[in-house]
Amino acid sequence: MLLSDHIEKIVSIAKNFGVLFVFLLLASCQFQPLHGSNSNVAKSGGLASVGVSQVDSRVAQQVRNHLLFLLNGGGPSVDKIHEARIRVTWVNRSLASIPTVRDSTAGTVTVTVSYDLVENASGEVITSGQRQAIASYDRTGQVFANNRAIRDAENRAAREAAEAIRLAIASDLNSAGS
């Protein structure tokens, strides 16, 4: 038997052990889908069982409407076991100013959503959190175009913040049940 035959055998054995190690490593993972049938979110009635508190501003209403759709999917209303009490703030900032141009040429809207997840039966706060989303926009010399660009940026940031809140609530509900 030649030395090269021994090396080939050792390489073959090492490959087999490597494949076995990868399979054992993957088998030890504890991945559990957030919306799977075994998750705590699914057992507690799903995200559709989460209501969202009333709000008092246009941007906050954008967050609330999108969050309601994400939680319920536009489906029929079910008994609300939990309530997400949200508070929304937003800031509009001009970013770039060019000395030769009268107005700033770019801006950002930052939407911040704080929430408390409350169990309706007991009134107990399960968890609290905060998420933030930023949307940028371009400004021109036209007033209407600027106002529309700001409103569109507010809407984009509100939708993004609602999506972040939905993921946080799903995670909170899943970890609260375990």
Image (cartoon, grey):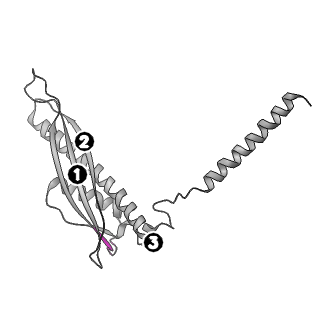
Residue placed under numbered mark 3 in the picture: 43
Residue at 78% over, 41% down: 13
Which one is earlier in the sequence, the residue at label 1 or at label 2? 1
Residue 152, position as x, y percentages in the image: 21, 43
Three-letter amino acid code at the position of disc 3: Lys
Q: Secondary structure at mark 3?
A: helix
Quadrant of the frame with the N terminus: top right
| Quadrant in the rendering for residue 167 | bottom left
Residue 96, position as x, y percentages in the image: 17, 29
Asked whether residue 33 is drawn in magenta, I would say no
Residue placed under numbered mark 1 in the picture: 112
Q: Residues within 10 Å of mark 3 (few under 14, many from 20)?
A: few
Q: CA distance from mark 1 to mark 2?
A: 12 Å
Magenta part of the protein: which range? 77-83
Which one is earlier in the sequence, the residue at label 3 or at label 2? 3
Three-letter amino acid code at the position of disc 2: Ala
Residue placed under numbered mark 2 in the picture: 135
Three-letter amino acid code at the position of disc 1: Thr
Left or right: 174 as drawn, with respect to 148: right
| Quadrant in the rendering for residue 70 | bottom left
Task: Please name which of the two marks, 1 or 2, marks the residue nearer to the observer.
Answer: 1
Left or right: 163 as drawn, with respect to 87: right
Q: Measured along the vertical axis of the image, is residue 72 above or below residue 111?
A: below
Q: Secondary structure at mark 2?
A: strand
Q: Main secondary structure of the magenta part?
A: loop
Residue 75, position as x, y percentages in the image: 35, 66
Which one is earlier in the sequence, the residue at label 3 or at label 1? 3
Q: Is residue 73 visible?
A: no
